Amino acid sequence: MIRRISAMLLAAASLFGAGVITAAPAQAASCTPDNACLYSDADFGGYKRDDYSTRTNWANIYYPGTPNIPLYAGDNYIFNVSSMDNWDTDTRISVYYNSAHWGPCFKIAAYGYVSNMAYITLSNGKQANDVMNSHLFGDNCSGTVYNF
């Protein structure tokens, strides 16, 4: 993590020194560096989990402060993950329909985000909103890479 933070600071200093000004990404100040943030609502709303780890089954992982609300509780459950924020600057996140990192999937770009999974159609014809069940830091999924 120190390496990644140093790289971000060096890149920012280089841009500043070159006179280049860039706007902060939409997800600025919302998530811990190198983590993924998972939200129960679109547009980074609702319950939030700031998570450093790959997770094989969201049904076993709960939003902080909510002992009875897992990230996944069956397809189309209202509190299932609806948006994600990837604050890892050099690693994509593969997001899977099934537990154990298999089945239809999509990827979130390094330091990217998906503000509304309802806009993503999986290879099985389902929309990704409220149906995804696991994620893996890495480029393992054969699905499309998103950053919107």
Image (cartoon, rainbow, N blue to C red):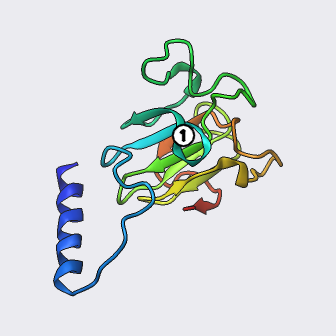
- Quarter of the figure with residue 79: top right
Percent position (x, y) of residue 29? Answer: 34, 50
Estimate how packed mark 1 is, as few (under 14), some (14 to 19) or many (20 or more) residues with alpha carbons within 10 Å.
Answer: few
The answer to whether residue 31 is left or right of residue 124 is left
The answer to whether residue 92 is left or right of residue 81 is left
- For the point 50% across and 21% down, the residue is 62
**Whether residue 16 is situated above or below residue 123 in the rendered picture:** below
Mark 1 falls on what kind of element? strand
Residue most extreme to the right: 125
To which residue does mark 1 refer? 45
- For the point 62% across and 27% down, the residue is 72
- Could you tell me how many numbered marks the image carries? 1
* Amino acid bearing label 1: Gly
Percent position (x, y) of residue 24? Answer: 36, 65
**Whether residue 132 is situated above or below residue 28 in the rendered picture:** above
The answer to whether residue 87 is left or right of residue 100 is left
- For the point 21% across and 56% down, the residue is 5
**Whether residue 144 is situated above or below residue 66 in the rendered picture:** below
Percent position (x, y) of residue 75? Answer: 74, 29
Residue most extreme to the top: 67
- Pick the residue in front: 108 or 37: 37
Q: Quadrant of the C terminus?
A: bottom right
- Pick the residue in front: 33 or 53: 33
Percent position (x, y) of residue 13? Answer: 17, 73
- For the point 32% across and 44% down, the residue is 32
- Quarter of the figure with residue 22: bottom left
The answer to whether residue 147 is left or right of residue 129 is left
